[in-house]
Image: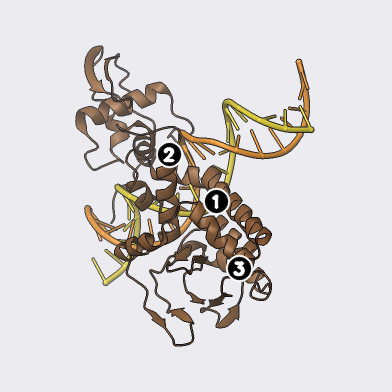
Chain colours: A brown, B orange, C yellow
Amino acid sequence: MGRAPCCDKGSVKKGPWSPEEDRKLKDYIHTNGTGGNWIALPTKAGMSITPSYTHLHFCTCACMHVHSCHGDVSGLKRCGKSCRLRWLNYLRPNIKHGDFSDEEDRVICALFAAIGSRWSIIAAQLPGRTDNDVKNYWNTKLKKKQLHLLIAAAAHGQQYGSRPPAPPFALEQQHHHHTSSTSIASLGQLLMFGGRGGDQQQQQQYTSSFSSVDISNNTSAAAVGLQESFMFGGLQFQQQEEETNNLLSPPAASSSGNDIMTYEHHEMISPSGFFFYGDGAGAAATQEGTRFLY
DNA sequence: AAATTAACCAACCGCCAAAAA
DNA sequence: CTTTTTGGCGGTTGGTTAATT
């Protein structure tokens, strides 16, 4: 019953790939493709290489190289899953390495705001970038960059307190049927978390830890700063809203007569994350299953 | 110059849905 | 229909390098 095991877990190699392993994998895939079967690939890779032959192929740098393959026919001692990852994240053609452009930053921020940590979807909008790359970039750099902007903008908002105050807002956790307001600090932390369904518990735990902080009485300037931070981040609210609605099923939104806009719970609503809308309201953050009261 | 800390990123792990036997 | 594998995805880890003390 079922399939045969994919590989002997005990005999496969782990850790960084050697140039020789990379060469074997590249050569095999250039010649044969993946064949839709990563699990079988490691044993085939290397086996198909005729000793001491020379061939041309396009390398990851998009240049044509001449490779001489001197018949190590032992095959790759790697799990197919590992081969797939290595190929997709590093070896396949047209992979872009190096710094992300401002435009790429904007795309990542906007999409993260809209759909959360769906890295494969985000990476698909950035030619040459892998989900792993985008994820790493977000976690190590962009997230902090956004947070600094947020903090700076909050400070700016306090410094120029005469700006038009933003209306108070609150986050209401629907799942738990209680209302909790949040602070700019917790919003920053939401940014730190991101994530989708699987992280909900963590997110909710964190959010609830801030639930007693209410900015509605004293930090309208901070709320203004929050809006600005996302402006600085290059997000285009109105456009983003459209894109989000195209990408995801739109939440059932209703606006009551007393300026309270309620987003009913919808499983596809900004799963991580931030939910944006324009029209002078700026940006605010919410979570899946969270009603945003404004 | 050495030790410590922070940042980076490739690769692994575990989960899930779909497919295969 | 049930069981098991596969492919894909996102979260996390740990090794390496850079920066700081």
SS under mark 1: helix
Q: Looking at the picture, does residue A85 appear above or below residue A70?
A: below
Does A152 sit left or right of A30 as displayed?
right
SS under mark 2: loop
Distance from Cα at disc 3 to Cα at disc 2:
32 Å
Circle 3: residue type: Thr
Packing grade of label 3 (10 A; few <14, some 14-19, many >=20) is many
| Dot placed on the residue nearer the N-terminal end, 3 or 2 | 2
How far from the left and from the top, in percent, is residue A148? 60, 50
Q: Looking at the picture, does residue A65 appear above or below residue C8?
A: above
- Front residue (pair A138, A23): A138
Q: Label 2: which residue?
A: A101
- Front residue (pair A240, A263): A240
Packing grade of label 1 (10 A; few <14, some 14-19, many >=20) is many
Does A192 sit left or right of A77 as displayed?
right
Q: Looking at the picture, does residue A50 appear above or below residue A261?
A: above
Circle 2: residue type: Ser
Residue A14 visible in the displayed image:
no
Q: Looking at the picture, does residue B11 appear above or below residue C16?
A: below
Toward the front, the furthest residue is A162
Query: Can marks 1 and 3 be said to lie on one chain?
Result: yes
Q: Chain of mark 1?
A: A
- Front residue (pair B11, A239): A239
Q: Label 1: which residue?
A: A146
